[in-house]
Image (spheres, rainbow, N blue to C red):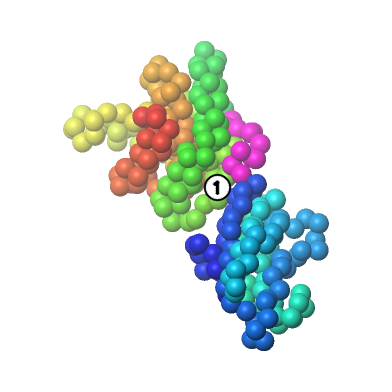
Amino acid sequence: MLKQPAGLGLVRVQEQQSRELALVGAGSDGQPLWVSLSDRMNPACPVALTELVARGQERRFKLTAVSPGSTTVEARQGGGSGALQDSVRVEVTAMASSVLRRGPQLGNDGAIPLALRTKLRTAMDAAWRLNSDPRFVETFRAVVSTLSGTEQPITVSADTLNRSVIHLLDTARDPRVKKGLAFERRDVRENAVSGLAPSYSFRLEPNIWIRRSAFDKGAHQLTACIFHEAAHVAGARGDPLAELGLEKLHVTAGLPR
């Protein structure tokens, strides 16, 4: 039977990476099974399959991810058109770095003053450089998957940066933001929170508001605000327990918020 290190009947491989797959056993007639890809004749097949070694009834194959897409590795008795004995679905996901940069955009619900835009663009460049760091990309994917309740693709960080829109928090007109700021000021007066949040967003909405004081602290603070709020834009919850979970992003990036 076809075996894989993880998953039941499904193997995920990132584009331009490879993975091994083992076949143990033979057909009911005692002969080796025919192993191939379901769409092997398709020039656009997203996977290349190579047999590496055969030892008795164990054979090992190398799956090489060529391009995003999906296919099936099939084990058949008596040749390519024989009876299907087992199969494993293979999904090839795009590399995070393969997503073209189109954002974040600058918004007007609290327009970013011209004097602050150079600093913000430096921070946005830094956020995109994090998207080239496999460790950060996987941490972002894993954290957002956990805090959103939905398994996310490896491209989630890049996709979220592209659809984010950044505004200045201090001059925001959105009534929900203004109401939240009023509650926050009350909480600070009552010592319910230690200080004012440097940035705001709403779950699954593209808008990110960043406080002027975060600009004053420099590009590192702005970068931390961008990817922190991007996690909420991507679907991460905003409750206190979830906020603790988001600290993994700051630890991985080396940038406190």
Residue 256 position within the rendered picture, expressed as x and y whole percent measured from the top left: 36, 29
Residue at position x 75%, y 65% from top? Answer: 39
Amino acid type, residue under disc 1 in the picture? Ile
User: In front: 163, or 149?
Assistant: 149
Secondary element under disc 1, as helix, strand or loop, is loop
Residue 32 x, y percent position in the rendering: 67, 77
Give the vertical position of 69 relative to 97 (above or below): below
Residue nearest the observer in this picture, 125 or 75: 75
224 sits to left or right of 186: right
| Residue 185, picture quadrant | top left
Image: magenta residue range: 93-105
Task: Please tell me whether residue 35 is drawn above or below residue 222 in the rendered image.
Answer: below
Vertical side of 176 occupied by 64: above or below? below
Which of the image's four quarters has the C terminus? Answer: top left
Q: Quadrant of the N terminus?
A: bottom right
Q: Is residue 257 magenta?
A: no
Residue under the point 71% across and 66% down: 37
Residue 182 vertical placement versus 231 (above, below): above
**Of residues 194 and 126, which is closer to you in this image?**
126
Decide if residue 169 is in sight here. no
Residue at the extreme bottom: 29
Residue farthest left in this picture? 190
Name the residue: 39% across, 18% down: 217
